[in-house]
Image: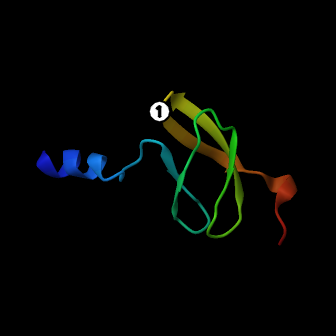
Amino acid sequence: MAKKSAKKEQGGGRIGRVRCLNCFERVKVPPRADKITCPSCGWEWRISWVNPNLAKVRGPMWDRMRF
């Protein structure tokens, strides 16, 4: 149990962050954001909120992707 609480204090974990599904880096999501751009790879993602603190990636912004 002590490991979980220490991880939360250090800012780790899933609350307030999502994982980029392209490069798998964790990205901090601003409150109430509906989209984010991964700073590592540049992909843009649509975001939804499970609750006020827990964001979820809904899918990529296909119209903005360059292949």
Q: In the rendered view of the protein, which quadrant contains the C terminus?
A: bottom right
Residue plotted at (42% across, 42% down): 15
Front-lying residue, 21 or 35? 35
Q: Looking at the picture, does residue 65 appear above or below residue 3?
A: below
Tell me where residue 41 appears, x and y as whole percent. Answer: 66, 70
Front-lying residue, 7 or 46? 7
Residue plotted at (77% across, 51% down): 61
Label 1 crowd bin: few (<14), some (14–19), many (20+), radius 10 Å: some
Residue plotted at (87% across, 54% down): 63
Residue at the extreme top: 51
Q: In the rendered view of the protein, which quadrant contains the N terminus?
A: top left
Residue at the extreme left: 2
Residue plotted at (58% across, 69% down): 23
Q: Is residue 16 left or right of residue 8?
A: right
Residue type at mark 1: give it: Asn
Q: Looking at the picture, does residue 8 appear above or below residue 37?
A: above
Tell me where residue 13 appears, x and y as whole percent. Answer: 36, 50
Which structural element holds mark 1?
loop
Colour basis: rainbow
Front-lying residue, 21 or 39? 39
**Circle count:** 1
- According to the picture, the residue beneath numbered tag 1 turns out to be 53
Residue 66: image quadrant is bottom right
Tell me where residue 57 appears, x and y as whole percent. Answer: 60, 46
